[in-house]
């Protein structure tokens, strides 16, 4: 069904051309409505979205429980600052900490969660410890602290000086971390699975090794779970998949089912170091985001989505493993839960446009990687339909070689 759109895509694009800063490369399509893994453009064309909301729409578009919770919340209270208590913030903190650990601080985005985590690590370790070790091809956001943590030169060019006190290690290399860590190190920070950097899985023993190094050296271990958290990997949080307990974890993207929300989770021991007056966020923990977060957690619980993620992940793996045998342009398949990367021997960018023409939305990252971040509640049929289109596009691209 098509919702009547006021403007055509091209009319909206004209507005953007005149009034919106052109810092994004956008596809020439205006989206107007979504439901589950489907989204419609202003012309009424339907797309199957295998990358809904850049990972934020973890339950797809307009998940019913989230919509209902938002409607109820919006008519009672839209914003209350953190000088008061609200039930919604207490309940969402309870959800995150009982499925995870420790205590929560709320903010509005991934980068903001990273900034808070860096401050908390420096405050907690004190005594001259300030250094943060992060990993090449990691991604932690675009504000100065988060961007300095993001060890990718292409994002750091031309905007220096960056923040002091960061060191970078090659991903997966424990020896390099041992070399870098010292008495000035406050924390080691890593994504359990690197997302933007190409869906890079941790080599065996890597996360465990980081925990050991942190313990031996008296520094903290921070997991950036902005992308891996909230069921994405088939566990509530990525750390649980490897059984490695971080001291601090950052959350955002899908944590509130598509509503802007970020969080820091810190252990009982570390949490009190974020003392009153040392950190704050005006919109952080607002009732709208909190109500959406609670409804998102309830949906994952009540619909058994963690098990579903594991089943759909296996289904993707079967499909793509068979395809890899057929197509040598697929160099490597990297799948963990609903994080899916196909590393090609050729640029992956053209696959995005070709899939879009056939009504399927995907992402290309790190030059050669086709990346999918499907909704946790994607159906078997949708997995199969999406794979069919990706398959035909990759076959065409292989033929064009
Ligand atoms: C997207 C992302 C961020 C940044 O989140 P924003 O909300 O865009 O600031 C940080 N870390 C990871 C792992 C991410 O995937």
Image (cartoon, grey):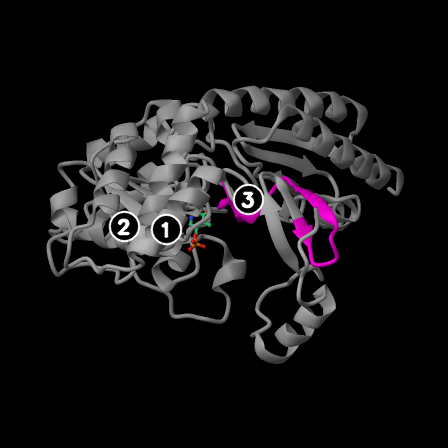
Residue at image coords 79%, 29%: 327
Q: Name the residue under label 3.
A: 61
Classify residue 344 as left or right of residue 75. Answer: right
Q: Where is residue 370 in the image (x, y as percent from the top left)?
A: 66, 41
Measure how far apart labels 3 and 1 are at the Cα level.
16 Å
Q: Give the range drawn in magenta.
A: 40-58
Which residue is at 83% across, 34% downward? Answer: 395
Do the numbered discs 1 and 2 sit on residues whose CB atoms are within 8 Å? yes
Element type where label 2 sits in the image: strand
Q: Mark 1 points at which residue?
A: 261
- The residue wearing badge 2 is 106
Residue farthest along the bottom direction in this orientation: 18
Comparing labels 2 and 3, the label whose residue is closer to the camera: 3
For the residue pair 87 and 205, the one nearer the viewer reads as 87
As for residue 105 lying within the magenta part, the answer is no
Using the rendered view, name the quadrant where residue 374 is placed.
Answer: top right
Q: Position of residue 30 (x, y in %)?
A: 66, 60
Q: How far apart are marks 1 and 2 (CA)?
A: 7 Å
Left or right of 16: which side holds 244? left
Tell me the quarter of the picture where residue 222 sits. Answer: top left
* Quadrant location of the C terminus in the rendered image: top right
Residue 166 seen in the current view: no
On the question of residue 137 being in view, the answer is yes
Which residue is drawn at the image coordinates 64% and 24% (left, top)? 380
Q: How far apart are marks 2 and 3 (CA)?
A: 23 Å
Query: Residue at the spot x=41%, y=53% of the render?
Result: 260
Instruction: Look at the numbered disc 3 and give the secondary structure of its residue.
Output: loop
- Ligand 1 within 8 Å of the CB at mark 1: no
Q: What element carries label 1?
A: loop
Q: Where is residue 199 drawn, in percent x and y?
A: 55, 38
């Amino acid at each position: 069904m098509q919702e009547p759109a006021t403007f055509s895509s091209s009319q909206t694009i004209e507005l953007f051309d005149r009034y919106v800063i052109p810092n994004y490369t956008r596809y020439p399509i205006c989206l107007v409505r979504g439901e589950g893994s489907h989204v419609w453009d202003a012309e009424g064309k339907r797309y199957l979205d295998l990358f809904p909301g850049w990972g934020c729409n973890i339950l797809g578009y307009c998940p019913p429980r989230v919509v209902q919770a938002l409607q109820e919340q919006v008519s009672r209270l839209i914003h209350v600052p953190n000088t008061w208590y609200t039930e919604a913030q207490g309940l969402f903190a309870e959800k995150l900490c009982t499925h995870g650990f420790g205590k929560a601080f709320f903010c509005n985005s991934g980068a903001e969660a990273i900034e808070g985590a860096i401050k908390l690590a420096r405050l907690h370790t004190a005594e001259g410890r300030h250094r943060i070790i992060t990993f090449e091809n990691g991604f932690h956001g675009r504000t100065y602290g988060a961007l300095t943590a993001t060890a990718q030169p292409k994002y750091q060019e031309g905007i220096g000086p960056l923040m002091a006190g960061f060191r970078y290690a090659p991903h997966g290399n424990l020896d390099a971390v041992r070399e870098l860590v010292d008495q000035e190190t406050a924390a080691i920070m890593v994504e359990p699975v690197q997302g933007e950097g190409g869906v890079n899985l941790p080599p065996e023993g890597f996360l465990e090794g980081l925990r050991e190094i942190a313990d031996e050296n008296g520094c903290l271990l921070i997991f950036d779970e902005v992308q891996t958290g909230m069921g994405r990997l088939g566990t509530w949080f990525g750390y649980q998949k490897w059984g490695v307990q971080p001291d601090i974890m950052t959350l955002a993207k899908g944590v509130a089912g598509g509503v802007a929300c970020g969080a820091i989770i810190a252990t009982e021991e570390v949490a009190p170091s974020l003392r009153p007056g040392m950190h704050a966020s005006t919109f952080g923990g607002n009732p709208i985001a909190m109500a959406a977060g609670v409804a998102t957690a309830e949906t994952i619980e009540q619909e058994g989505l963690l098990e579903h993620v594991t089943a759909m992940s296996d289904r993707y793996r079967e499909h793509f493993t068979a395809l890899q045998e057929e197509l040598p342009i697929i160099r490597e398949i990297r799948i963990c839960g609903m994080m899916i990367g196909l590393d090609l021997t050729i640029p992956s960018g053209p696959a995005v446009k070709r899939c879009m023409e056939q009504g399927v939305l995907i992402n290309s990252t790190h030059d050669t990687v086709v990346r999918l971040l499907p909704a946790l509640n994607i159906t078997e049929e949708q997995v199969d339909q999406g794979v069919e289109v990706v398959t035909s596009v990759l076959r065409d691209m292989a033929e064009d070689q």
